[in-house]
Image: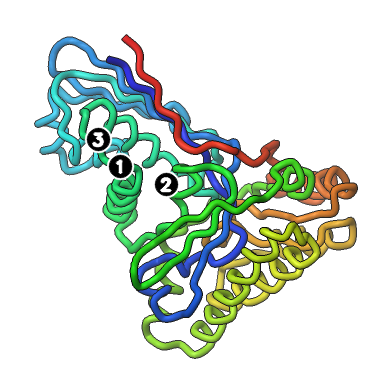
Amino acid sequence: MQVFAKSPCRVDLSGGTLDIWPLYLYHSNAVTVNFAVNLYTSCRITPRSGAAVTLRSQDQNIEETYDSLDRLVEARRHRHTLAAQVLKYFRPEGGMVVETNSESPQGAGISGSSSMLISTVSAFNRFCGTRHPIENVREIAQNIEAQVVKVPTGCQDYYPAMYGGVSAIDLTIAGIRRSALPVDLAQLNSRFVLAYTGKPRNSGINNWEVTKLHIDGDRTVLKNFARIAAISHAMRGALKKGDWNETARLLREEWAHRRKNAPGITTPVIDHLVEKSRKHGARAAKVCGAGGGGCVVFLCEPDARDRVAALIEREGAGNGVKVLPVGAAPRGVVIRTSG
């Protein structure tokens, strides 16, 4: 039985980094707001005779073959580390080819690796017949990602890949709860521009630096995150009401506080694009993910969207900046079987 799974990436609007345990336990009403975008990751598992296991990444152009799963488990290093760690967990029987692909630029800050793990874990969950419910799929994916990046990971990145649409992820003592926000996706699509800055970033490093400062009691970081938690709580309400003016105001405020948390969250290129775009119809902007590069989301008036996109391409041309032709993805992970 061949299994194929694909899931969308995401754009975070507010409350990022708070989703890393235990940071959210120190703030009341902690919530992260994000939405899925139609840039997809995928995993295809094809059985074959014999015991050999091949791991192939189309987007990274890498391939490695092991004589058996035992040889894969014994190996100290892997070129396709993410897929190898998933196989180590599931221990599937028999030979197979595991092929993955990501439409996200590398280091884009839109959770390509988290989406890839939801796709890959979901594919093996079906392939092996383990029947883990979707929340357990998230736990497995999150824990494997922590093994790969070797620092704590947050939970919010997996929910757009799981469910699609616009999400509010409540982070509480009793656990994590995702709620769908009733946002008109056509309205959302007419108002946002997603630009890749041409510079990858390492979210594990940035998030871990901020996490350490928070746990060590840095007063500036604690104060900023307290405000970010309040902003994110308010943004959920603004989106539910369809109040785009308030959403833009909160997005501006979120970014103003976030950029104070640690050096390197913004860059001169990002600051230039944000400043220029505001003069041409962008109401707000912020870096996606941990910052330091990757993608920036711009919230615009509908009649200014194309103008802002053209400005970003023009101003960022010398630095490899490009606008990504994306829209909101209404569905999460999809799994298909054949054969």
The residue sitting at the bottom extreme is: 219
Q: What residue is drawn where x is 73% and y is 43%? A: 189
Q: Is residue 60 above or below residue 138?
A: above
Mark 1, Cα crowd under 10 Å, few <14 / some 14-19 / many 20+, is few
Q: Earlier in the sequence, mark 2 or mark 3?
A: 2
Give the crowd class for mark 2: few <14, some 14-19, many >=20 residues within 10 Å: many
Q: Which numbered disc covers residue 133?
A: 1
Q: Left or right of 283: which side holds 141?
A: left
Camera-nearest residue between 202 and 158: 158
Q: Marks 3 and 2: in contact by CB < 8 Å?
A: no
Q: Quadrant of the N terminus?
A: top left
- Residue 264, image quadrant: bottom right
Q: CA distance from mark 1 to mark 3?
A: 6 Å
Residue depicted at 31% across the width and 16% down the height: 2
**Which is closer to the viewer, label 2 or label 3?**
3
SS for tag 2?
helix
Please rate how many residues cluster around mark 3, counting C-alpha atoms within 10 Å: few if below 14, some from 14 to 19, many from 20.
few
Q: Is residue 174 left or right of residue 65?
A: right
Whether residue 156 appears in this view of the structure is yes
Q: Which residue is mark 2?
A: 114
Amino acid identity at mark 1: Pro
First in residue order: circle 2 vs circle 1: 2
User: How many angstroms separate mark 2 from mark 1 (CA)?
Assistant: 17 Å
Q: Could you say whether the residue bearing mark 3 is in a helix, strand or loop?
A: loop
Tag 1–tag 3 contact (CB < 8 Å): yes
Q: Return the x and y of residue 117 as percentages of the image width and height.
A: 37, 41
